[in-house]
Image (tube, helix red, strand yellow):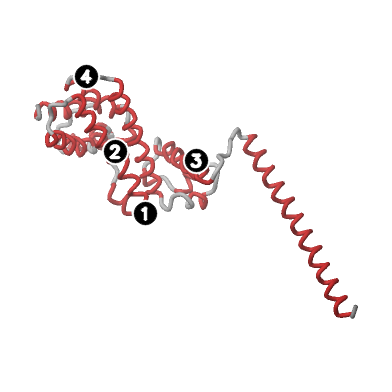
Amino acid sequence: MCWVNVFLLEEMREKDRHEKNTSFLQEGWNCWRSKTTANTNKKEGKEMPKGSIELTNARKEEIIAACELLYQTKGFKDITIQDIAKETSFTRTSIYNYFETKEEIFMALLQKEYERWVEELDHVIQNHETMERDEVAKTLAVSLENRELLLKLMSMNHYDMEANSRLERVVEFKEAYGASMKTVDRLLQKFCFDLSDGERQDFIYSFFPFVYGIYPYTKVTDKQKEAMEKADVGYVYMSIYQLAYTCAKKLLEKNG
């Protein structure tokens, strides 16, 4: 065997040993990282979801829940992505893997509130055979009284929220919004079956815009009260239930 072949053979052997060592070290690192992550999650009482879709959804839920928690004590303009990240188990930059803007997070929270409202109304539809119109009005009023967060989010500037969100996120939100309208329509179809298609549509397109203004009217600050007094503007306090019930009842009477 000539010296050239010997040199090449030795070089191939050295390369093979290097690759084996690198592979061994990489396997050791992966094993350590896996065990460390598992131990951390175990200590914190967390179970990591299996599968990328499940993991993505779980992280989105965590982000939305953090936003909901902060919104209890802060306003929209005062909450930052960094604030939301501090309430989650991952970093601010990681949030951008799931939501590109703060508006997208708030819109996802509003979407979830619409879905919760639909669930509550669906429960009523499935568990009642008959209901008088006055009871339908009361049912709608109670369901909105239970969804104060929904009403608070409704009162936000949707134009800017949607403008600063990706199209696919806006579509998801609109689907939830549309589902709430369809659910109210099903409520009317079942319990106010003598209403025509046009009358049900009139109810929905009168009631929903009204609902958007309930929260600002019922949650008046001391500063706003003082300003109205100085401006000689009469203000009569009404609860969420009172406003929603009165509106729904009058609309149902009108179409009766």
The first of marks 4 and 1 along the sequence is 4
Q: Which residue occupies the foreground of this view, 255 or 1?
A: 1
Vertical order, 51 against 7 (above or below): above
Name which quarter of the figure residue 179 lies in.
Answer: top left
Residue plotted at (45% across, 38% down): 65
Label 4 amino acid? Thr
Secondary element at tag 3: helix
Task: Read off the residue under disc 3.
Answer: 58
**Mark 4, mark 1: which one is toward the viewer?**
4
Quarter that holds the C terminus: top left
Name which quarter of the figure residue 51 lies in.
Answer: top right
**Mark 3, mark 4: which one is toward the viewer?**
4
Task: Read off the residue under disc 1.
Answer: 166
Residue plotted at (16% across, 38% down): 231
Task: Read off the residue under disc 2.
Answer: 179
Which class describes the residues within 10 Å of circle 2: few (<14), some (14-19), or many (20+)? some
Q: Are the two marked residues, 4 and 1, in contact with CB atoms closer than 8 angstroms? A: no
Q: Between marks 3 and 4, how big is the CA–CA gap?
A: 39 Å
Task: Read off the residue under disc 4.
Answer: 130
**Mark 2, mark 1: which one is toward the viewer?**
2
The first of marks 2 and 3 along the sequence is 3
Residue 194 appears left or right of 25: left
Which class describes the residues within 10 Å of circle 1: few (<14), some (14-19), or many (20+)? some
Q: Between marks 2 and 1, how big is the CA–CA gap?
A: 20 Å
The first of marks 1 and 3 along the sequence is 3
The first of marks 2 and 1 along the sequence is 1
Q: Between marks 2 and 3, how big is the CA–CA gap?
A: 23 Å
Q: Are the two marked residues, 3 and 4, in contact with CB atoms closer than 8 angstroms? A: no
